[in-house]
Image (cartoon, rainbow, N blue to C red):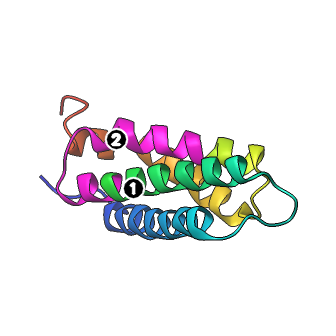
Amino acid sequence: MSRPRGKTIIMLIDFIVGIVVTVEGVHGLVSPVGQGLSASLVYAVGATYVIIGLLSVAVGYGLWKVRPWAWPLGLWAGMVYLVLGVVFAVPLILLVGIVSLVFYYYNRTSLKRYLGKVKP
């Protein structure tokens, strides 16, 4: 079966975004509380970022190894990124655009067929 176009790009985006978000979350966990925010809020956001970042790394791995669970997990991770971007007003507008493109790609029949979600 041939690989759908863009699989490698999406996999790399998931890996890179996952690593960046995980590092940012770890930074939030170990850095001192700043800008008038409570410590518990900073730790909660940091822990959330670590979990979501590791989730993106898992999605990248799943796409690399062609695992069927990568598709729904990738959609879920994308929704969480959008919510975090809006709720925490993270200045990552570019990330929201990239996630929107990823949603589009995840819903293409060629990727679903490649991962075994749709019968050929």
- State which region is magenta: 59-81
Mark yes or no: residue 109 visible.
no
Question: Counting other residues with Cα less than 10 Å from the Cα at mark 1, is it few (<14), some (14-19), or many (20 or more)?
Answer: many
Check residue 54 in the rendering and tell me which mark sits there, or answer none.
Answer: 1
Kind of element beneath mark 1: helix
Kind of element beneath mark 2: helix
**Most common secondary structure along the magenta stretch:** helix
Image location (x, y in percent) of residue 71: 34, 41
Image location (x, y in percent) of residue 41: 71, 47
Check residue 71 in the rendering and tell me which mark sits there, or answer none.
Answer: 2
Q: Are marks 2 and 1 in contact (CB under 8 Å)?
A: no
Residue type, mark 1 in image:
Leu
Q: Is 80 included in the stretch rendered in magenta? A: yes
The residue at 80%/67% (across/down) is: 34
Q: Earlier in the sequence, mark 2 or mark 1?
A: 1
Decide if residue 5 is on the left or right side of residue 119: right
Residue type, mark 2 in image:
Trp
Q: Quadrant of the C terminus?
A: top left
Along the line of sight, the residue nearer the viewer: 31 or 19: 31
Mark yes or no: residue 34 visible.
yes
